[in-house]
């Protein structure tokens, strides 16, 4: 049986490990921190490389306003230029390569950036507010590992709880007393109606049959050999989420566009059945790759180097990155 992977590893290289264990916040490290194996992969990246870990680096540099391009697994001139700019402005050796010192500095700057966002907006948002500043706060809280719900830009009780935990752990002294606004009777009635409707919708969804079937897997196998294309959503080229989306569309089922969105929109199950989705943690923490389970430990997916292919979950690469199965409802 394949064991589910711990979804929140931390950097354990020599320097980073010593920093983590010497820090009073060693157990509240950012959820964006990565495992030793992923870090070693990242350090090998340089101009001309093609690897999913490049996207992980690009996301960080874009948050810090250095990378201006679109996400791509190709370590191109734009990625190298962004990293060199970061290195130069932080008085590091501007090699354009993601060495350990550079990566740790990136993490340090990200921590400062997200902490500033929280300090700037946390005391201003109110319960029920839907805004871009709420989204920024949720993303910042997610970075520190305190918010693990959907980034929906809505300030609800989960966001408040995450803020309270962040406030206590990092001793920010945020005044959150104004977070809960007064709810008028009409608003309360509306909320109660919405809750009742949501419960009814959920109950209806639970009695519907799941989408797993031989027909879904048969459709998926029709595209064996289709090449991997970053952002691809058609048989001429798929990325992993584009492949899932395309296959399920053939059966009248609409899936979100990204792997993490698909993960959070589907139902968890203990063990995968034929047609269920299986999720893996590859180039970033959390669900970042997925495929359709075929049975006997096999799954079909759009792989970076192989295109649409069948792999076995029990081999060392996939078993060490396995998160778990989810089910798509009709």
Image (cartoon, rainbow, N blue to C red):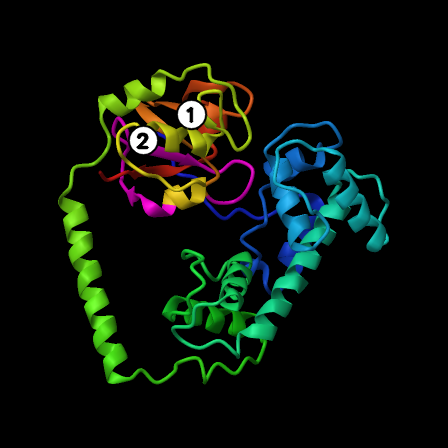
Ranked by sequence position, the earlier of labels 2 and 1 is 2
Asked whether residue 222 is drawn in magenta, I would say no
Query: Considering only vertical position in the picture, is 197 above or below 175?
Result: above
Q: Is residue 255 above or below residue 106?
A: above
In the rendered structure, the answer to whether residue 293 lies left or right of residue 168 reads left
| Residue at x-position 26% and y-position 29% | 251
Quadrant placement of the C terminus: top left
Residue 284 part of the magenta segment:
yes
Residue where numbered disc 2 is placed: 248
Placement of the N terminus among the 4 image quadrants: top left
Residue 230 rendering spot, x and y as whole percentages: 55, 30
Secondary element at tag 1: strand
Name the residue rendered at 34%, 21% in the picture.
Answer: 220
- Tag nearer the camera, 2 or 1: 2
- The local crowd at label 1, few if under 14, some if 14 to 19, many if 20 or more residues have their Cα within 10 Å, is many
- Residue position marked by numbered label 1 in the rendering: 301
Give the side of residue 213 with respect to residue 105, left or right.
left
Q: Percent from the top left, x then y, of residue 8? A: 50, 48
Secondary structure at badge 2 equals helix
Which range of residues does the magenta coloring cover? 264-286
Can residue 12 be seen at all in this image of the molecule?
A: no
């Amino acid at each position: 049986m394949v064991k589910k992977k711990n979804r929140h590893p931390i950097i354990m290289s020599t320097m980073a490990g010593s920093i983590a264990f010497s820090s009073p916040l060693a157990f509240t490290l950012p959820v964006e921190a990565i495992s030793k194996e992923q870090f070693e992969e990242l350090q090998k990246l340089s101009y001309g490389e093609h690897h999913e870990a490049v996207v992980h680096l690009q996301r960080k540099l874009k948050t810090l306003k250095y990378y201006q391009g679109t996400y791509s697994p190709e370590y191109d001139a734009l990625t190298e230029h962004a990293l060199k700019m970061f290195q130069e402005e932080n008085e590091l050796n501007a090699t354009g390569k993601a060495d350990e010192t550079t990566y740790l500095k990136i993490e340090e700057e990200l921590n400062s950036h997200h902490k500033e966002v929280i300090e700037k907006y946390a005391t201003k948002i109110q319960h029920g507010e839907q805004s871009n500043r709420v989204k920024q706060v949720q993303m910042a809280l997610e970075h520190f590992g305190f918010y693990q719900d959907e980034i929906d830009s809505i300030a609800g009780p989960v966001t408040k709880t995450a803020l309270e935990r962040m406030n206590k752990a990092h001793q920010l002294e945020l005044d959150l007393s104004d977070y809960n606004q007064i709810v008028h009777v009409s608003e309360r009635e509306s909320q109660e109606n919405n809750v009742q409707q949501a419960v009814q919708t959920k109950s209806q969804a639970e009695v519907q049959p799941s989408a797993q079937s031989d027909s879904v897997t048969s459709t998926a196998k029709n595209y064996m050999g289709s090449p991997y294309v970053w952002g691809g959503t058609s048989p001429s080229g798929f990325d992993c989420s584009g492949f899932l989306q395309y296959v399920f569309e053939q059966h009248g089922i609409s899936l979100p566009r990204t792997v993490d969105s698909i993960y959070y929109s589907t139902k968890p199950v203990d063990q995968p059945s034929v047609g269920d989705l299986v999720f893996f943690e590859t180039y970033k923490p959390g669900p970042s790759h997925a495929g359709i389970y075929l049975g006997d430990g096999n799954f079909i997916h759009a792989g970076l180097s192989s295109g649409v292919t069948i792999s076995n979950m029990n081999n060392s690469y996939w078993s060490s990155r396995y998160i778990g199965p989810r089910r798509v409802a009709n």
